[in-house]
Amino acid sequence: MFEALNRLFTRDDDADPAHDAQLAVAALLVHLAAVDGAVKPEERTAVRQALTDFYGLEEVEVERLVGEAMRRDAEAVDFYRFTSELSTLDSEARIEIVRMMWQVVFADDKNHELEDNMVWRVAELIGVSTRDRNIIKHQVARR
């Protein structure tokens, strides 16, 4: 417990901000895939594909990132730890994060209310407007 608290309040000065952002996105996507109570194979694939496409990662890197994201998500009590990393990104990157989230939501052709609510909350926390969030939602849902 003390180790978890220590990690919460200390920051590694050698940490790579780009990796921190990748890890934050991965943790949000992993959480989103499970928020409705079941992670379907299509959602698992969508998480990995979104990370591969957006960050240009190799399969091994994606697997490592998802594994670390799952551990971080299990330790997290809220989204702040992840969204604070992302709110400083440029608008285009933040919009793409919301797009990745919708891709995970619609991977199983369903939009569960808990998934919808999570995308809404994260979009608000990282500064993506309601208008942009809804436009992206409809674009992804039509595919």
Image (cartoon, grey):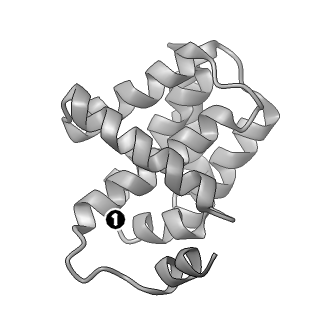
Identity of the residue drawn at 59% across and 65% down: 125
Image quarter hosting the N terminus: bottom right
How many labels sit on residues?
1
The amino acid at mark 1 is Leu
Q: Quadrant of residue 42?
A: top right
- Describe residue 100's horizontal placement relative to residue 20 as left or right: right
Q: Is residue 5 above or below residue 115?
A: below
Q: Nearer the viewer, residue 36 or 88?
A: 36
Expressed as whole percent of the image width and height from the top left, the position of residue 81 reads: 53, 69
Could you say which quadrant of the image residue 41 lies in?
A: top right
Depth check: 95 or 69 in front?
69
* Residue under the point 51% across and 64% down: 83
How far across and down, in percent of the image, does residue 98 sit? 49, 44
Q: What residue sits right under mark 1 in the picture?
A: 89
Q: Which of the pair 53/77 is nearer the observer?
A: 77
Query: In screen coordinates, is 51 left or right of 47?
Result: left
92 horizontally vs 86: left or right? left
- Label 1 element class: loop
Q: Residues within 10 Å of mark 1 (few under 14, many from 20)?
A: some
Image location (x, y in percent) of residue 34: 67, 34
Query: Where is 119 relative to 48, above or below?
Result: below
Q: Going by the picture, which residue comes out furthest to the front?
A: 2
Residue displayed at 71% across by 37% down: 115
Residue beneath the point at 42% across and 68% down: 85
| Residue 107 can be seen in this image | yes
Q: Nearer the viewer, residue 55 or 71?
A: 71
Place of residue 54 in the rendered image (x, y in percent of width and height, measured from the top left): 28, 37
Q: Is residue 90 visible?
A: no
